Amino acid sequence: MSNQRFVSPDLIRQGFSRAMSDMYREEVPLYGALMELVAQVNAQVLEQQPAIARQLQHSGELQRLDLERHGAIRVGTAEELATLARLFAVMGMQPVGYYDLTPAGVPVHSTAFRAVHEQALQVSPFRVFTSLLRLELIDNPELRQFAEQVLARRSIFTPKALELIDQAQAQGGLDADAAQCFIQEALETFRWHHHATVTAAQYATLSAQHRLIADVVAFKGPHINHLTPRTLDIDDVQRLMPAHGITPKAVIEGPPRRACPILLRQTSFKALEEAVAFVDQEHNQGSHSARFGEIEQRGAALTPKGRALYDQLLNAARDALGDFPSEANAQRYEQLMQEHFDAFPDSHAAMHEQGLAYFRYFVSEAGLAARAEPARPTSLEALLAAGHLGFEPLVYEDFLPVSAAGIFQSNLGDDSQSHYAGQSNRQAFETALGRSTLDELQLYAQAQQRSLQQCAATLGLPAL
Ligand code: OOG
Ligand code: NI
Protein backbone atom coordinates (compact mmCIF):
# COMPACT_ATOMS: atom_id res chain seq x y z
CA MET A 1 0.00 0.00 0.00
CA SER A 2 1.52 3.31 -0.97
CA ASN A 3 1.41 6.38 1.24
CA GLN A 4 0.57 8.53 -1.78
CA ARG A 5 -3.13 8.21 -1.28
CA PHE A 6 -2.95 9.45 2.30
CA VAL A 7 -3.28 13.10 3.25
CA SER A 8 -0.33 14.33 5.32
CA PRO A 9 -1.23 14.53 9.04
CA ASP A 10 0.15 18.10 8.94
CA LEU A 11 -2.51 19.10 6.43
CA ILE A 12 -5.23 17.40 8.43
CA ARG A 13 -4.08 19.43 11.45
CA GLN A 14 -4.08 22.62 9.39
CA GLY A 15 -7.62 21.90 8.18
CA PHE A 16 -8.78 21.02 11.67
CA SER A 17 -7.28 24.15 13.19
CA ARG A 18 -9.16 26.24 10.60
CA ALA A 19 -12.42 24.41 11.15
CA MET A 20 -12.07 24.82 14.91
CA SER A 21 -11.41 28.54 14.53
CA ASP A 22 -14.49 28.96 12.30
CA MET A 23 -16.65 27.08 14.77
CA TYR A 24 -15.39 29.07 17.74
CA ARG A 25 -15.82 32.40 15.97
CA GLU A 26 -19.44 31.51 15.34
CA GLU A 27 -19.94 30.43 18.95
CA VAL A 28 -18.03 33.33 20.56
CA PRO A 29 -18.16 36.52 18.44
CA LEU A 30 -15.69 38.26 20.77
CA TYR A 31 -13.07 35.80 19.54
CA GLY A 32 -13.56 37.22 16.04
CA ALA A 33 -13.03 40.74 17.38
CA LEU A 34 -9.84 39.61 19.12
CA MET A 35 -8.54 37.96 15.95
CA GLU A 36 -9.06 41.19 14.03
CA LEU A 37 -7.27 43.23 16.65
CA VAL A 38 -4.33 40.82 16.72
CA ALA A 39 -4.11 40.84 12.92
CA GLN A 40 -4.04 44.67 12.93
CA VAL A 41 -1.32 44.86 15.56
CA ASN A 42 0.75 42.19 13.82
CA ALA A 43 0.52 44.01 10.49
CA GLN A 44 1.67 47.20 12.18
CA VAL A 45 4.64 45.53 13.88
CA LEU A 46 5.74 43.96 10.60
CA GLU A 47 5.48 47.31 8.83
CA GLN A 48 7.23 49.36 11.50
CA GLN A 49 9.92 46.89 12.50
CA PRO A 50 11.49 45.41 9.37
CA ALA A 51 14.11 43.56 11.44
CA ILE A 52 11.37 41.49 13.09
CA ALA A 53 9.71 40.90 9.72
CA ARG A 54 13.03 39.69 8.31
CA GLN A 55 13.71 37.36 11.23
CA LEU A 56 10.23 35.83 11.02
CA GLN A 57 10.55 35.48 7.27
CA HIS A 58 13.85 33.73 7.70
CA SER A 59 12.69 31.34 10.41
CA GLY A 60 9.51 30.43 8.55
CA GLU A 61 7.33 31.81 11.34
CA LEU A 62 5.90 34.54 9.11
CA GLN A 63 4.04 32.09 6.91
CA ARG A 64 2.51 30.35 9.92
CA LEU A 65 1.64 33.47 11.92
CA ASP A 66 -1.92 33.95 10.67
CA LEU A 67 -2.68 30.29 11.29
CA GLU A 68 -1.07 30.20 14.68
CA ARG A 69 -3.23 29.50 17.70
CA HIS A 70 -3.64 27.22 20.65
CA GLY A 71 -6.77 25.90 22.29
CA ALA A 72 -7.54 24.27 25.62
CA ILE A 73 -9.84 21.49 26.78
CA ARG A 74 -10.44 19.58 30.02
CA VAL A 75 -11.43 15.92 30.22
CA GLY A 76 -12.69 13.75 33.02
CA THR A 77 -11.47 10.18 32.54
CA ALA A 78 -8.40 8.21 31.55
CA GLU A 79 -10.29 6.70 28.64
CA GLU A 80 -11.24 10.13 27.30
CA LEU A 81 -7.62 11.26 27.52
CA ALA A 82 -6.23 8.14 25.87
CA THR A 83 -8.71 8.38 22.99
CA LEU A 84 -7.90 12.06 22.56
CA ALA A 85 -4.23 11.11 22.25
CA ARG A 86 -5.18 8.76 19.40
CA LEU A 87 -7.40 11.42 17.79
CA PHE A 88 -4.63 14.03 17.90
CA ALA A 89 -2.12 11.48 16.56
CA VAL A 90 -4.16 11.31 13.33
CA MET A 91 -3.25 15.02 12.93
CA GLY A 92 0.42 14.51 13.78
CA MET A 93 0.09 15.87 17.31
CA GLN A 94 1.98 14.29 20.21
CA PRO A 95 1.70 14.95 23.94
CA VAL A 96 4.61 17.23 24.92
CA GLY A 97 5.44 18.11 28.50
CA TYR A 98 3.71 17.52 31.83
CA TYR A 99 2.13 20.39 33.77
CA ASP A 100 0.90 19.93 37.31
CA LEU A 101 -1.58 22.64 38.26
CA THR A 102 -2.51 21.27 41.71
CA PRO A 103 0.02 23.40 43.64
CA ALA A 104 -1.89 26.40 42.28
CA GLY A 105 -5.19 25.07 43.56
CA VAL A 106 -6.49 23.75 40.24
CA PRO A 107 -7.26 20.01 40.48
CA VAL A 108 -5.88 18.99 37.07
CA HIS A 109 -2.69 17.90 35.41
CA SER A 110 -2.02 18.55 31.77
CA THR A 111 -0.01 18.12 28.61
CA ALA A 112 0.11 19.96 25.29
CA PHE A 113 -0.65 18.11 22.09
CA ARG A 114 1.37 19.58 19.24
CA ALA A 115 3.50 18.84 16.20
CA VAL A 116 7.12 18.18 17.11
CA HIS A 117 9.27 18.67 14.02
CA GLU A 118 10.13 22.16 12.75
CA GLN A 119 8.87 21.37 9.25
CA ALA A 120 5.55 20.10 10.60
CA LEU A 121 5.29 23.15 12.87
CA GLN A 122 5.66 25.42 9.86
CA VAL A 123 2.67 23.82 8.16
CA SER A 124 0.57 24.24 11.30
CA PRO A 125 1.74 25.01 14.84
CA PHE A 126 -1.74 24.28 16.26
CA ARG A 127 -1.53 23.15 19.90
CA VAL A 128 -4.10 22.01 22.44
CA PHE A 129 -3.46 22.40 26.17
CA THR A 130 -5.24 19.33 27.52
CA SER A 131 -6.08 18.83 31.18
CA LEU A 132 -7.25 15.74 33.02
CA LEU A 133 -9.40 16.30 36.08
CA ARG A 134 -7.93 14.71 39.21
CA LEU A 135 -11.10 13.29 40.70
CA GLU A 136 -9.06 11.53 43.38
CA LEU A 137 -8.52 14.96 44.94
CA ILE A 138 -12.23 15.40 45.70
CA ASP A 139 -12.35 14.66 49.40
CA ASN A 140 -16.10 14.00 49.58
CA PRO A 141 -16.49 10.29 48.60
CA GLU A 142 -20.14 10.60 47.56
CA LEU A 143 -19.48 13.54 45.33
CA ARG A 144 -16.48 11.79 43.81
CA GLN A 145 -18.57 8.72 43.09
CA PHE A 146 -21.34 10.81 41.60
CA ALA A 147 -18.87 12.58 39.30
CA GLU A 148 -17.41 9.25 38.24
CA GLN A 149 -20.84 7.87 37.42
CA VAL A 150 -21.84 10.88 35.35
CA LEU A 151 -18.58 10.77 33.44
CA ALA A 152 -18.84 7.01 32.84
CA ARG A 153 -22.18 7.53 31.08
CA ARG A 154 -20.99 9.99 28.49
CA SER A 155 -19.26 9.37 25.20
CA ILE A 156 -17.39 12.43 23.95
CA PHE A 157 -16.55 11.07 20.48
CA THR A 158 -18.93 10.39 17.62
CA PRO A 159 -19.03 6.73 16.46
CA LYS A 160 -17.74 7.84 13.05
CA ALA A 161 -14.78 9.68 14.63
CA LEU A 162 -13.86 6.54 16.56
CA GLU A 163 -14.12 4.48 13.38
CA LEU A 164 -11.86 6.86 11.47
CA ILE A 165 -9.28 6.93 14.27
CA ASP A 166 -9.16 3.11 14.12
CA GLN A 167 -8.93 3.24 10.34
CA ALA A 168 -6.09 5.77 10.37
CA GLN A 169 -4.20 3.68 12.89
CA ALA A 170 -4.74 0.39 11.06
CA GLN A 171 -3.93 1.71 7.58
CA GLY A 172 -1.32 4.29 8.51
CA GLY A 173 -3.33 7.29 7.31
CA LEU A 174 -6.52 8.69 5.77
CA ASP A 175 -7.31 9.49 2.15
CA ALA A 176 -8.74 12.88 1.15
CA ASP A 177 -12.42 12.00 1.68
CA ALA A 178 -11.80 10.23 4.97
CA ALA A 179 -9.63 13.14 6.18
CA GLN A 180 -12.42 15.64 5.43
CA CYS A 181 -14.91 13.48 7.23
CA PHE A 182 -12.51 13.06 10.16
CA ILE A 183 -12.16 16.83 10.56
CA GLN A 184 -15.93 17.29 10.73
CA GLU A 185 -16.47 14.38 13.11
CA ALA A 186 -13.56 15.31 15.39
CA LEU A 187 -14.91 18.86 15.64
CA GLU A 188 -18.06 17.54 17.33
CA THR A 189 -16.08 16.57 20.43
CA PHE A 190 -15.12 20.21 21.04
CA ARG A 191 -18.49 21.82 20.40
CA TRP A 192 -20.36 23.80 23.05
CA HIS A 193 -23.57 22.21 24.42
CA HIS A 194 -26.31 24.29 25.96
CA HIS A 195 -27.79 21.21 27.58
CA ALA A 196 -26.10 20.06 30.75
CA THR A 197 -26.13 16.41 31.83
CA VAL A 198 -27.03 17.06 35.47
CA THR A 199 -29.76 18.86 37.44
CA ALA A 200 -29.38 22.44 38.63
CA ALA A 201 -28.86 21.19 42.19
CA GLN A 202 -26.21 18.68 41.16
CA TYR A 203 -24.44 21.36 39.18
CA ALA A 204 -24.44 23.60 42.25
CA THR A 205 -22.91 20.85 44.37
CA LEU A 206 -20.18 20.13 41.84
CA SER A 207 -19.50 23.82 41.41
CA ALA A 208 -19.24 24.35 45.16
CA GLN A 209 -16.47 21.74 45.28
CA HIS A 210 -14.64 23.51 42.43
CA ARG A 211 -16.00 25.35 39.41
CA LEU A 212 -13.66 23.42 37.21
CA ILE A 213 -15.18 20.14 38.34
CA ALA A 214 -18.63 21.36 37.30
CA ASP A 215 -17.25 22.47 33.96
CA VAL A 216 -15.87 19.02 33.19
CA VAL A 217 -18.53 16.80 34.74
CA ALA A 218 -21.81 18.60 33.97
CA PHE A 219 -21.55 18.74 30.19
CA LYS A 220 -21.61 16.34 27.25
CA GLY A 221 -18.07 16.92 26.17
CA PRO A 222 -14.84 18.87 26.50
CA HIS A 223 -15.94 22.11 24.81
CA ILE A 224 -12.99 24.13 23.57
CA ASN A 225 -12.69 26.82 26.23
CA HIS A 226 -10.49 29.28 24.34
CA LEU A 227 -8.52 29.71 21.14
CA THR A 228 -5.50 31.93 21.37
CA PRO A 229 -3.97 33.81 18.45
CA ARG A 230 -0.28 34.72 18.51
CA THR A 231 0.57 38.40 18.54
CA LEU A 232 3.88 40.12 17.88
CA ASP A 233 3.17 42.79 20.51
CA ILE A 234 1.09 41.68 23.47
CA ASP A 235 1.37 45.00 25.32
CA ASP A 236 -0.16 46.78 22.36
CA VAL A 237 -3.03 44.33 22.11
CA GLN A 238 -3.61 44.49 25.88
CA ARG A 239 -3.73 48.29 25.67
CA LEU A 240 -6.17 48.27 22.73
CA MET A 241 -8.50 45.57 24.05
CA PRO A 242 -10.87 47.81 26.08
CA ALA A 243 -11.58 50.03 23.07
CA HIS A 244 -12.69 46.86 21.26
CA GLY A 245 -15.12 45.90 24.00
CA ILE A 246 -12.77 43.34 25.57
CA THR A 247 -11.65 43.56 29.21
CA PRO A 248 -8.30 41.89 29.81
CA LYS A 249 -7.08 40.43 33.09
CA ALA A 250 -4.90 42.72 35.18
CA VAL A 251 -1.43 41.32 34.51
CA ILE A 252 0.31 39.73 31.57
CA GLU A 253 1.62 36.30 32.60
CA GLY A 254 5.19 35.23 31.88
CA PRO A 255 8.36 37.28 31.44
CA PRO A 256 8.27 41.09 31.26
CA ARG A 257 8.57 43.06 28.03
CA ARG A 258 12.07 42.78 26.53
CA ALA A 259 13.93 43.64 23.33
CA CYS A 260 14.42 39.90 22.71
CA PRO A 261 11.27 38.05 23.82
CA ILE A 262 11.73 34.75 25.66
CA LEU A 263 9.32 31.88 26.33
CA LEU A 264 5.71 32.96 26.40
CA ARG A 265 3.68 35.98 27.50
CA GLN A 266 -0.09 35.61 27.82
CA THR A 267 -3.13 37.59 28.78
CA SER A 268 -6.81 36.63 28.78
CA PHE A 269 -10.24 38.16 29.10
CA LYS A 270 -12.88 36.95 31.50
CA ALA A 271 -15.06 33.95 30.83
CA LEU A 272 -18.50 34.62 29.41
CA GLU A 273 -21.61 33.95 31.46
CA GLU A 274 -23.64 31.68 29.19
CA ALA A 275 -27.20 30.37 29.38
CA VAL A 276 -27.52 26.62 29.80
CA ALA A 277 -30.36 24.19 30.50
CA PHE A 278 -30.01 21.67 33.30
CA VAL A 279 -31.81 18.36 32.90
CA ASP A 280 -34.61 19.43 35.21
CA GLN A 281 -35.24 22.60 33.21
CA GLU A 282 -37.03 23.09 29.93
CA HIS A 283 -35.27 26.21 28.75
CA ASN A 284 -31.86 27.77 29.20
CA GLN A 285 -32.62 28.93 32.71
CA GLY A 286 -29.24 28.24 34.21
CA SER A 287 -25.88 29.73 33.48
CA HIS A 288 -22.31 28.59 33.32
CA SER A 289 -19.05 30.35 32.57
CA ALA A 290 -16.17 28.49 31.02
CA ARG A 291 -15.23 30.04 27.73
CA PHE A 292 -12.85 32.93 27.55
CA GLY A 293 -10.35 34.61 25.24
CA GLU A 294 -6.59 34.76 25.37
CA ILE A 295 -3.66 36.11 23.38
CA GLU A 296 -0.03 35.09 23.47
CA GLN A 297 3.36 36.36 22.36
CA ARG A 298 6.07 33.78 21.83
CA GLY A 299 9.82 34.18 22.21
CA ALA A 300 12.96 32.10 22.42
CA ALA A 301 12.96 28.55 23.75
CA LEU A 302 15.29 28.38 26.76
CA THR A 303 17.82 25.71 27.68
CA PRO A 304 17.64 24.11 31.15
CA LYS A 305 20.11 26.80 32.29
CA GLY A 306 17.99 29.60 30.82
CA ARG A 307 14.82 28.12 32.23
CA ALA A 308 16.35 27.83 35.70
CA LEU A 309 17.28 31.51 35.52
CA TYR A 310 13.75 32.41 34.36
CA ASP A 311 12.16 30.43 37.20
CA GLN A 312 14.54 31.95 39.74
CA LEU A 313 13.82 35.54 38.64
CA LEU A 314 10.08 34.96 38.40
CA ASN A 315 9.98 33.47 41.90
CA ALA A 316 12.10 36.28 43.31
CA ALA A 317 9.81 38.93 41.80
CA ARG A 318 6.71 37.14 43.11
CA ASP A 319 8.26 36.74 46.55
CA ALA A 320 9.04 40.44 46.60
CA LEU A 321 5.42 41.20 45.67
CA GLY A 322 4.34 39.03 48.60
CA ASP A 323 0.90 38.30 47.14
CA PHE A 324 -0.78 36.93 44.01
CA PRO A 325 -0.56 39.43 41.17
CA SER A 326 -3.90 41.22 40.88
CA GLU A 327 -5.50 44.43 39.72
CA ALA A 328 -4.50 46.14 42.96
CA ASN A 329 -0.78 45.42 42.67
CA ALA A 330 -0.42 45.07 38.88
CA GLN A 331 1.82 48.11 38.48
CA ARG A 332 4.15 47.13 41.27
CA TYR A 333 4.33 43.58 39.92
CA GLU A 334 5.32 44.86 36.48
CA GLN A 335 8.00 47.05 38.02
CA LEU A 336 9.38 44.19 40.14
CA MET A 337 9.46 41.91 37.11
CA GLN A 338 11.36 44.52 35.07
CA GLU A 339 13.87 44.99 37.88
CA HIS A 340 14.49 41.30 38.47
CA PHE A 341 14.74 40.44 34.80
CA ASP A 342 17.54 42.94 34.32
CA ALA A 343 19.65 39.94 35.28
CA PHE A 344 18.53 38.04 32.15
CA PRO A 345 20.71 39.02 29.15
CA ASP A 346 18.60 40.77 26.52
CA SER A 347 20.44 40.10 23.28
CA HIS A 348 20.60 36.97 21.15
CA ALA A 349 24.39 37.14 21.18
CA ALA A 350 24.58 37.12 24.99
CA MET A 351 21.90 34.43 25.31
CA HIS A 352 23.87 32.34 22.82
CA GLU A 353 27.18 32.92 24.49
CA GLN A 354 25.83 31.99 27.92
CA GLY A 355 23.91 28.97 26.66
CA LEU A 356 20.54 30.33 27.79
CA ALA A 357 18.48 29.62 24.66
CA TYR A 358 18.23 27.13 21.79
CA PHE A 359 19.11 28.33 18.31
CA ARG A 360 18.76 27.43 14.67
CA TYR A 361 22.05 27.86 12.82
CA PHE A 362 22.21 28.78 9.15
CA VAL A 363 24.93 29.33 6.54
CA SER A 364 25.32 32.98 5.57
CA GLU A 365 26.07 34.39 2.11
CA ALA A 366 29.68 34.82 3.22
CA GLY A 367 29.80 31.18 4.31
CA LEU A 368 28.46 30.02 0.97
CA ALA A 369 30.91 32.20 -0.92
CA ALA A 370 33.87 30.86 1.06
CA ARG A 371 33.07 27.19 0.54
CA ALA A 372 35.87 26.61 -1.97
CA GLU A 373 38.56 28.44 -0.01
CA PRO A 374 41.16 26.07 1.35
CA ALA A 375 41.88 28.17 4.47
CA ARG A 376 38.27 28.68 5.52
CA PRO A 377 37.26 28.11 9.16
CA THR A 378 35.78 24.72 10.02
CA SER A 379 34.85 24.77 13.70
CA LEU A 380 31.54 26.15 14.94
CA GLU A 381 33.24 28.94 16.92
CA ALA A 382 35.45 29.97 14.01
CA LEU A 383 32.58 29.86 11.52
CA LEU A 384 30.48 32.06 13.79
CA ALA A 385 33.37 34.45 14.36
CA ALA A 386 33.99 34.72 10.61
CA GLY A 387 30.30 35.35 10.00
CA HIS A 388 30.00 32.22 7.88
CA LEU A 389 27.25 30.96 10.14
CA GLY A 390 24.43 32.91 11.73
CA PHE A 391 21.84 31.90 14.31
CA GLU A 392 18.39 32.83 15.46
CA PRO A 393 16.47 31.58 18.50
CA LEU A 394 14.09 28.65 18.22
CA VAL A 395 10.61 29.75 19.11
CA TYR A 396 9.12 28.37 22.34
CA GLU A 397 6.30 26.01 21.32
CA ASP A 398 5.11 25.05 24.81
CA PHE A 399 3.41 26.43 27.93
CA LEU A 400 4.38 27.60 31.41
CA PRO A 401 2.82 26.10 34.54
CA VAL A 402 2.77 29.30 36.63
CA SER A 403 1.23 31.23 33.73
CA ALA A 404 -1.30 28.48 33.03
CA ALA A 405 -2.34 28.57 36.69
CA GLY A 406 -2.82 32.34 36.40
CA ILE A 407 -4.97 31.89 33.30
CA PHE A 408 -7.07 29.18 34.95
CA GLN A 409 -7.52 31.30 38.06
CA SER A 410 -8.49 34.49 36.33
CA ASN A 411 -11.28 32.57 34.65
CA LEU A 412 -12.48 30.69 37.68
CA GLY A 413 -13.00 33.79 39.79
CA ASP A 414 -11.38 34.87 43.00
CA ASP A 415 -13.53 32.67 45.21
CA SER A 416 -11.92 29.53 43.88
CA GLN A 417 -8.51 29.57 45.53
CA SER A 418 -8.31 26.01 46.77
CA HIS A 419 -5.59 23.89 48.27
CA TYR A 420 -4.91 20.32 47.35
CA ALA A 421 -2.62 18.01 49.22
CA GLY A 422 -2.09 15.76 46.18
CA GLN A 423 1.39 15.01 44.94
CA SER A 424 2.45 15.74 41.41
CA ASN A 425 1.84 12.50 39.58
CA ARG A 426 3.29 12.33 36.12
CA GLN A 427 3.21 8.57 36.16
CA ALA A 428 -0.53 8.42 36.82
CA PHE A 429 -1.06 10.95 34.04
CA GLU A 430 0.95 8.90 31.57
CA THR A 431 -0.85 5.70 32.57
CA ALA A 432 -4.15 7.47 31.82
CA LEU A 433 -2.75 8.81 28.58
CA GLY A 434 -1.62 5.35 27.51
CA ARG A 435 1.85 6.56 26.58
CA SER A 436 4.63 8.76 27.88
CA THR A 437 4.81 12.49 27.27
CA LEU A 438 7.72 13.87 25.26
CA ASP A 439 10.37 16.04 26.85
CA GLU A 440 10.17 19.47 25.23
CA LEU A 441 13.81 20.30 26.00
CA GLN A 442 14.95 17.28 24.06
CA LEU A 443 12.85 18.38 21.09
CA TYR A 444 14.53 21.81 21.00
CA ALA A 445 17.98 20.25 21.40
CA GLN A 446 17.23 17.94 18.47
CA ALA A 447 16.02 20.79 16.26
CA GLN A 448 19.17 22.77 17.08
CA GLN A 449 21.31 19.71 16.28
CA ARG A 450 19.51 19.17 12.95
CA SER A 451 20.27 22.74 11.95
CA LEU A 452 23.98 22.18 12.69
CA GLN A 453 23.96 19.00 10.62
CA GLN A 454 22.39 20.88 7.75
CA CYS A 455 25.03 23.61 7.97
CA ALA A 456 27.78 21.00 7.96
CA ALA A 457 26.26 19.35 4.90
CA THR A 458 25.93 22.68 3.07
CA LEU A 459 29.54 23.57 3.84
CA GLY A 460 30.79 20.09 3.00
CA LEU A 461 32.14 19.57 6.54
CA PRO A 462 32.00 16.20 8.32
CA ALA A 463 30.23 17.55 11.41
CA LEU A 464 29.72 20.65 13.55
C1 OOG B 1 -6.24 26.00 30.33
C2 OOG B 1 -5.53 27.17 30.96
C3 OOG B 1 -4.07 27.25 30.54
C4 OOG B 1 -2.57 28.43 28.84
O1 OOG B 1 -2.48 28.96 27.72
O2 OOG B 1 -1.62 28.39 29.63
C5 OOG B 1 -3.87 27.86 29.20
C6 OOG B 1 -7.69 25.89 30.70
O3 OOG B 1 -8.25 26.86 31.24
O4 OOG B 1 -8.26 24.83 30.41
O5 OOG B 1 -4.72 27.91 28.38
NI1 NI C 1 -4.31 29.14 26.77
Image: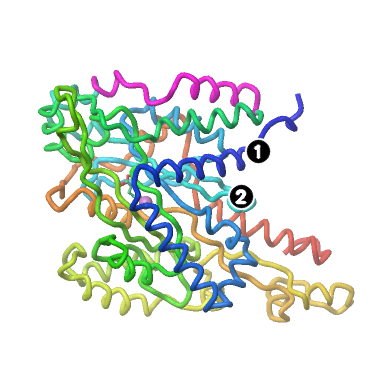
- Relative placement, left or right, of 415 versus 325 is left
Tell me the element at label 2.
helix
Question: Residue at coordinates 38% horizontally, 26% vertically from top-left?
Answer: 156
Question: Residue at coordinates 20% horizontally, 29% vertically from top-left?
Answer: 277
Quarter of image, res 353: bottom right
Q: Is residue 294 above or below residue 168?
A: below
Q: Give residue 276's position: percent from left, percent from top.
A: 21, 34
Which residue does the numbered mark 1 point to in the structure image?
8
Q: Is residue 34 above or below residue 328?
A: above
Q: Give residue 411's position: percent from left, percent from top.
A: 24, 50
The type of colouring in the image is rainbow
Name which residue type carries label 1: Ser
Q: Nearer the viewer, residue 178 or 104?
A: 178
Question: Does residue 124 belong to the magenta stretch?
Answer: no
- Relative placement, left or right, of 189 versus 418 is right
Q: Nearer the viewer, residue 177 or 148?
A: 177
Please state, as top left, top right, bottom left or bottom right, where the N terminus lies in the image.
top right
Tell me the element at label 1.
loop
- Which disc number belongs to residue 123? 2
- Relative placement, left or right, of 279 versus 78 is left
Q: Contact (CB < 8 A) between labels 1 and 2?
A: yes
Q: Give residue 251's position: percent from left, percent from top.
A: 27, 66
CA–CA distance in space, label 1 to label 2: 10 Å
Q: Is residue 181 visible to the viewer in this orientation of the structure?
A: yes
Q: Is residue 401 above or below residue 156?
A: below
Crowd around label 1: few <14 · some 14–19 · many ≥20 (10 Å):
many
